Amino acid sequence: MELIDYLHTHFLTRAQLLAACATDGAHLDAFIAAGTMPAPSYRLQVRIDCASYFGEHAEAHALDWYATGYVEWLRMLLEGDHDPYALFAARYRTALAALPLSGMEATDAHLRSEWQHFLAGTYGLCTRSGLPEDIAAKELAIHVIRMLTDDGRPLVAEERERLAQARGLLDRASSLFAPHERARSSRVRYGLK
């Protein structure tokens, strides 16, 4: 049940997302199919077997879980006044430029790749909000950490400070990850707990 508790604490069910945006499933499904709305970050296939005085009962359900930041994104889509990819790219670039670390460029190819991960729901599970600002922060932090540590050489004081800043940024942008994912997560891989 640890996974269910984690999802209830950090994510929204499909019904909760729809209620928060005052819309219906048809709109959400249309945006996902059009490639403008992220897919759910988690999908649980749940089978329930029940025994009671009245006998046995079984049922199965698919439960979708969405990042909390997707409320903002879905509301923006419902307004219909935006080019979703252009908005994603602009928000990503703005966030990257505002971060205290530097060293990564948001090329068109990079942004297209990030956009595909965003739409797949990947960043919904590995960042706090699933939105472009957290995605940019996480990717920059990982880039800086790799740049400083991949060659295995000892770091000088300035580099150790930059590494600490990058890990702090990664900590702020990254989700806590589901219990079964933590050991393989970027938090563990890049020196966070």
Image: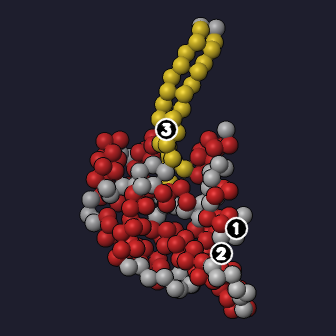
Circle 2 sits on which residue?
167
Q: Is residue 152 above or below residue 119?
A: below
Kind of element beneath mark 3 = strand
Looking at the picture, which amino acid does disc 2 mark?
Arg
Residue 192 is marked as 1
Residue 63 is marked as 3
Q: Is residue 135 left or right of residue 168?
A: left
The residue under the point 38% across, 72% down is 111
Is disc 1 in contact with disc 2, using a CB cutoff of under 8 Å? yes
Kindly report the distance in space between the C-alpha atoms of the residues bearing marks 2 and 3. 33 Å
The residue closer to the viewer here, 47 or 23, is 47
Which mark sits nearer the N-terminus, 1 or 2?
A: 2
Image coordinates of residue 173 in percent, x first then y, are 58, 68
Looking at the picture, which amino acid does disc 1 mark?
Leu
The residue under the point 30% across, 49% down is 33
Kind of element beneath mark 2 = helix
Which mark sits nearer the N-terminus, 2 or 3?
A: 3
Q: The N terminus appears in which quarter of the rendering? A: top right
